[in-house]
Image (cartoon, rainbow, N blue to C red):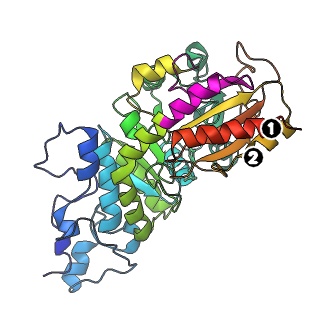
Amino acid sequence: MGRRSCLAGGNRPGAVKSGKPDNLSPATRLVQAGRAPEWTGPVVNPPVWRGSTHLYENCADLAAGRADRDGEFYYGRRGAPTQWALARALTEMEPGAAGTVLYPSGVSAIAGAVLAVLRAGDVLLVSDNAYEPSRTMARSLLADCGIETRFFDPLDLAGFSARFCERTKAVLLESPGSLTMEVCDVPALAAMARERGAVSLIDNTWATPLGFPALHHGVDIAIMSLTKHVGGHSDLMMGSASAGPELYPRLRAKAQALGLVVSPDDAALALRGLRTMGLRLERGAASALALAQWLAGRPEVAHVLCPLLPGAPGHDLWARDFTGGCGLFSFVLTGRTPAHRARLIDALNLFGIGYSWGGFESLVIPFDPQRARSETSWPPAGWNKDDRLGVRLAIGLEDAGDLIADLEAAFVAMDAE
Ligand SMILES: *Cc1c(COP(=O)(O)O)cnc(C)c1O
């Protein structure tokens, strides 16, 4: 068997295996995606191909392998079947995608994708509810590269339109936004960006393509922190960006220029997580809705920021555009102090205090909704100016009744002093 025989044609990360019906539902595609017998041999999952060096048969073989082709052995930085299988699986999960680039974290996926489409002198519009490290990146890394960032209120379509200038070349969206969970009209914003010749990118970590097929809704580049739902077990860091045939080569070229690689061990873990992601998302969303409903009836709570909850902000757009959700949402306390909130959080037994989300264990962090914004007029209509005691919950796979009981006891502890 030749050393490169596992790489028979048709296995490039962007290519969808021929012979599979293309009308399979997402649940079925989650099981099938990225599984090429040429990569896996007789086992179900691709082996973990560790290695920096790939050996060649002879000089002719070496010369043939030198071409910069996606999905062919060359050198470890270009990956191997473990990474390619994950990349292709993610491509198959994102309707309209021609390929997916893997990055060492979600943040590096955002940086890599933005740098792939912008150059010095360009202007980037960033949704004012974007993830904090994206905002910091705009002010530091992108500013250093000569890229100017302007934030926009994600709920103000007219304001968005007015923010464009000749140099606006890309728009970074996030929906629901981090912490405050506003859902924006992504199809309308993406269409406006396209009309003005700007590339649209979305941080789609919350919904994944299962809940919001972003390219199908008109977005050009769909980014995820795979650390969250795809990994699903709080044991790896990774990110991805998927795009159609025009932009995918640019993503890949920039990531290669930056020397970005993910380890095959982590890629194998992410692939394992991906197979159960649909079930975990459904369970997380169902539990989140149960908790959100319960919280909405509590006198200590001013606002429940959960788009899954009928009547909550963003629910109508969520219901129009999304086919699912996840366990991440927030609420805001009323008539309390930061000390009350600390007592509430410290009293929780089933929620770990920590960043990240999308793992099997429920998590909680405090946040200030006002500090998360720069452009949006705050507080929003219907809010009190001191509605600033935010609590973000990431609901894991525990029993929802147990989580509610934990919260109920913590509310008692909060007011016990
Ligand atoms: C966590 C997160 C990221 C960053 O992902 P890392 O893998 O931690 O770098 C990006 N976007 C959102 C919305 C996140 O919550």
Instruction: Identify the residue at horizontal 53%, vertical 39% (top origin).
Output: 400
Q: Position of residue 140 (x, y in %)?
A: 70, 48
Q: Earlier in the sequence, mark 2 or mark 1?
A: 2
The answer to which image quadrant residue 334 occupies is: top right
Tell me which amino acid carries mark 2: Ala
Q: How crowded is mark 2: few (under 14 residues within 10 Å), some or many (20 or more)?
A: some
The residue where tag 1 is placed is 414
Q: Does the magenta stretch include residue 289?
A: yes
Q: Which residue is most to the right?
A: 417
Q: Are marks 2 and 1 in contact (CB under 8 Å)?
A: yes
Vertical relation: 189 (above or below) 291: above
Q: Where is residue 138 in the image (x, y as percent from the top left)?
A: 65, 42
Tell me which amino acid carries mark 1: Met
The tally of labels here is 2
Which of the pair 413/397 is nearer the observer? 413
Instruction: Identify the residue at horizontal 36%, vertical 38% (top origin).
Output: 210
Q: Position of residue 38 (x, y in %)?
A: 17, 67
- In-image side of 6 versus 309 (left or right): left
Q: How crowded is mark 1: few (under 14 residues within 10 Å), some or many (20 or more)?
A: many
Q: Which residue is most to the bottom?
A: 58
Q: Residue 83 carries which label?
A: none
- In-image side of 216 versus 129 (left or right): left
Q: Is residue 49 visible to the viewer in this orientation of the structure?
A: yes
Which of the pair 340/213 is nearer the observer? 340
Vertical relation: 255 (above or below) 370: below
The answer to which image quadrant residue 58 occupies is: bottom left
Query: Quarter of the image containing the C terminus?
Result: top right
Magenta-tinted stretch: 287-313
The residue where tag 2 is placed is 347
Instruction: Identify the residue at horizontal 57%, vertical 13% (top origin).
Output: 158
Which of the pair 380/295 is nearer the observer? 295
